[in-house]
């Protein structure tokens, strides 16, 4: 080999590191470092190849390329171990298939492990229409980062699944000796309904932690002040008006809606509206007979999944 070419290769490789230390790496997780080869000393392009000694835990991308004069190329060296081991290996950088440099590599792979503070999150009683939030703290006591996913048990790819509990994050990365906060929110959707859902926290290349969420939806404290209205005797073609009150003793505004089968001779003044929290709403009902007979009807009032019945 020409001495000038030899010195050129030496100058190129002298700028490269002699040792790549990956430190602690999680099992079954790919960790990548980058080395840059610069062709700033040669008067022509050079062919660079990085050779791995058939170690399956090491991948190189790209494994070879041609670098033009005064240009550079990046090579990504990745390590991914399938078990906890101490990895010591060499890779060889070959320039124009005539000059080589050995770079030593090392890594210590460890299994990832995450912990959660408890296995059951009980939201207790929650008023329908409201929601409650608890904290799920995920801690990583190990020296390697840990990637996780939270999987809801019982999820299917068909039909409409009602999820009463929602998560602020369903996956994430927890650095070594750190913690990750996930907010769990319970949505009270149905009256007097107890909900329970189970979850698995699955750690990539590590353990699995299971937890449950429980919550009970309470009904609104609503009522009507009078469930029977008697208009008495009314002259034909005459009319009479009486009122009822919808009572809401809950801390939440709620909607109401009336419906009934026969829209005459009884007429409800406000068919729908809102009852303020800790208050009441007055509803006027008009009776206007069409014939000289006895009239009877039942009016239904729906208040956020609560059914009230008024007989008139």
Image (cartoon, rainbow, N blue to C red):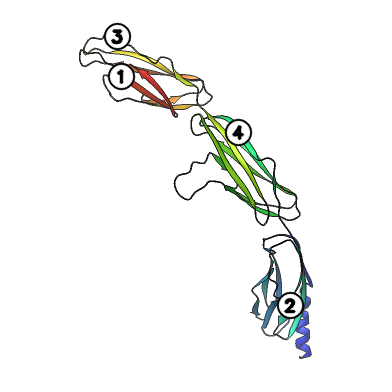
User: Of marks 1 and 2, which one's residue comes earlier in the chain?
Assistant: 2
User: Of marks 3 and 2, which one's residue comes earlier in the chain?
Assistant: 2
Say whether residue 269 is visible: no
Give whichever of 26, 251 is nearer the camera.
26
Tag 2 residue: 92
Front: mark 4 or 3: 4
Tag 4 residue: 123
Circle 2 sits in a helix, a strand or a loop, which is it?
A: strand
* Rendered residue at 24%/15% (across/down): 289
Position in image of residue 238 (x %, y %) = 24, 12
User: Of marks 4 and 1, which one's residue comes earlier in the chain?
Assistant: 4
Tag 3 residue: 232
Residue count near mark 4 (Cα–Cα under 10 Å), binned few <14, some 14–19, many ≥20: some
User: Are the two marked residues, 4 and 1, in contact with CB atoms closer than 8 angstroms?
Assistant: no
* Rendered residue at 33%/17% (across/down): 285
User: Of marks 4 and 3, which one's residue comes earlier in the chain?
Assistant: 4
Residue count near mark 3 (Cα–Cα under 10 Å), binned few <14, some 14–19, many ≥20: few
Give whichever of 179, 46 is nearer the camera.
179
Tag 1 residue: 297
């Amino acid at each position: 080999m020409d001495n000038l070419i030899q010195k050129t290769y030496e100058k190129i490789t002298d700028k490269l590191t002699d040792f790549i230390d990956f430190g602690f790496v999680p099992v079954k997780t790919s960790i990548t470092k980058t080395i840059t080869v610069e062709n700033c000393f040669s008067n022509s392009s050079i062919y660079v190849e990085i050779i791995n000694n058939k170690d399956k835990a090491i991948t190189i991308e790209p494994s070879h390329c041609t670098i033009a004069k005064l240009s550079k190329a990046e090579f990504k060296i990745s390590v991914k171990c399938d078990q906890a081991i101490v990895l010591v290996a060499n890779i060889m950088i070959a320039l124009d298939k005539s000059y080589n440099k050995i770079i030593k590599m090392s890594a210590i792979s460890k299994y990832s492990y995450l912990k959660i503070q408890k296995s059951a999150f009980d939201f207790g009683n929650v008023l329908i229409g409201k929601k409650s939030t608890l904290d799920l703290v995920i801690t990583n006591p190990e020296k390697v980062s840990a990637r996780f996913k939270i999987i809801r048990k019982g999820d299917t790819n068909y039909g409409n699944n009602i999820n009463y509990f929602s998560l602020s994050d369903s996956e994430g990365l927890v650095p070594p000796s750190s913690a990750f906060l996930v907010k769990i929110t319970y949505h009270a959707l149905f009256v007097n309904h107890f909900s329970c859902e189970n979850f698995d926290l699955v750690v990539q290349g590590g353990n699995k932690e299971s937890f449950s969420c429980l919550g009970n939806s309470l009904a609104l404290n609503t009522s009507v002040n009078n469930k029977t209205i008697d208009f008495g005797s009314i002259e034909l073609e005459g009319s009479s008006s009486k009122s009822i009150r919808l009572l809401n003793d809950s801390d939440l505004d709620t909607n109401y809606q009336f419906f009934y089968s026969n829209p005459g001779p009884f007429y409800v003044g406000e068919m729908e509206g809102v009852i303020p929290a800790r208050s009441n709403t007055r509803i006027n009902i008009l009776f206007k007979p069409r014939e000289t007979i006895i009239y009877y009807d039942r009016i239904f009032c729906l208040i956020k999944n609560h059914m009230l019945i008024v007989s008139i």
